[in-house]
Image (cartoon, rainbow, N blue to C red):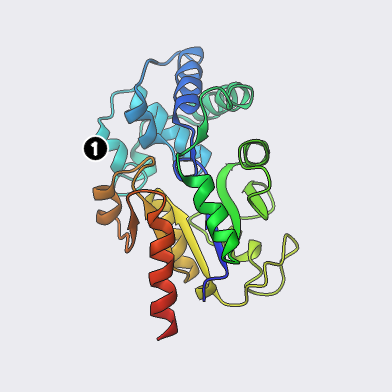
Amino acid sequence: MIKAAVFDMDGTILNTIGDLTDSLNYALVETGHKGGHPEEMVKLCFGWALNLDMIKALAMAKGFSAKDLELAGNKIPVEDIPATEEEINELMRVFTSYYGSHNQIKTKPYSGIPEVIRTLRKKGIRCAVASNKDDDHVQILSEKLFPGLFDISIGRNPEMAIKPDPETVVMLLNVDGSTKWFDMCVRNAKEIVYIGDSEVDIMTGKKGGFPSISVAWGFRTGEFLKNHGAERIADKPEDIIEIIKKIQITDSR
């Protein structure tokens, strides 16, 4: 029985790519790198930890192709990406500062997502957000754009590991009974469904031992997700509800 649905934020419930693209291009130019990169390329830079996101952004600015960006951090080792520690830190500093005050200009929920969350809540399924995005940004966006829809939202903070380490989700949902964050009455990983748009989210579900759903409207394509081990793919938000029903039926057998 699924008791809780945990959502990634960027590319899953929120279309943040416009503000991310504008902020990243601004930061690249401000730090002496090539800007003007399109959304489709910038999408490929985000999804991991911010440090790796910035490394991939520098690779993009230095001429990496879309294919190479897909492989960066996966089949292309991070140490093979041409970026110095100084470049990474400076880009991260400028990007974080600028994005912090420009993250609600173009950002909006994907059409149909609020309705899906309301439907899940009516079915007694608790809903939460677990993101690698800075926790301050997660709290602001969650409260403003999804008022009253999530039981709790957690972003990147110094007290826990980042995805694909499943610690955020496990602690959030009290699987081990020791969380200080929130008790969602979940005692078994199989009672959680994790929903995200990237290979990081697929890895998070597999490492945590809970079923996951990949969404094809975010920062990665359906084909990319399949190639990275996605077992369930939602092509539109309402598919999430149907997939959860199928998980419930399978688990009850």
Specify the quadrant of the image occupied by residue 232.
bottom left
The image position of residue 55, as x and y in percent, is 43, 34
Say which quadrant the C terminus sits in. bottom left
**Residue 162 appears in the figure:** no
Left or right: residue 130 compared with residue 112: right
Q: Residue at x 37, y 26 (%)?
A: 39
Extreme residue toward the bottom, this view:
253
The residue pinned by badge 1 equals: 67
Q: Is residue 130 above or below residue 175?
A: above
Q: In screen coordinates, is 74 left or right of 90?
A: left
Q: Residue at x 36, y 42 (%)?
A: 217
Q: In this view, does 4 lie to the left or right of 248?
A: right
Q: 191 above or below 145?
A: below
Please state the total of marks drawn on the protein image: 1
Residue 75 pos. (x, y %): 29, 49
For image coordinates 63% across by 24% down, the residue present is: 97
The residue most toward the right is 180
State the residue in front, 155 or 88.
155
Name the spot of residue 135 as percent of width and height, x first: 65, 42
- Label 1: how many Cα within 10 Å (few below 14, some 14–19, many 20+): few
Is residue 70 in view from this perspective?
Answer: yes
Q: Where does residue 49 sit, x and y in percent of width and height?
A: 51, 43
**3, 226: nearer the viewer:** 3
Give SS at disc 1.
Answer: helix
Q: What's the residue type where badge 1 is placed?
A: Lys
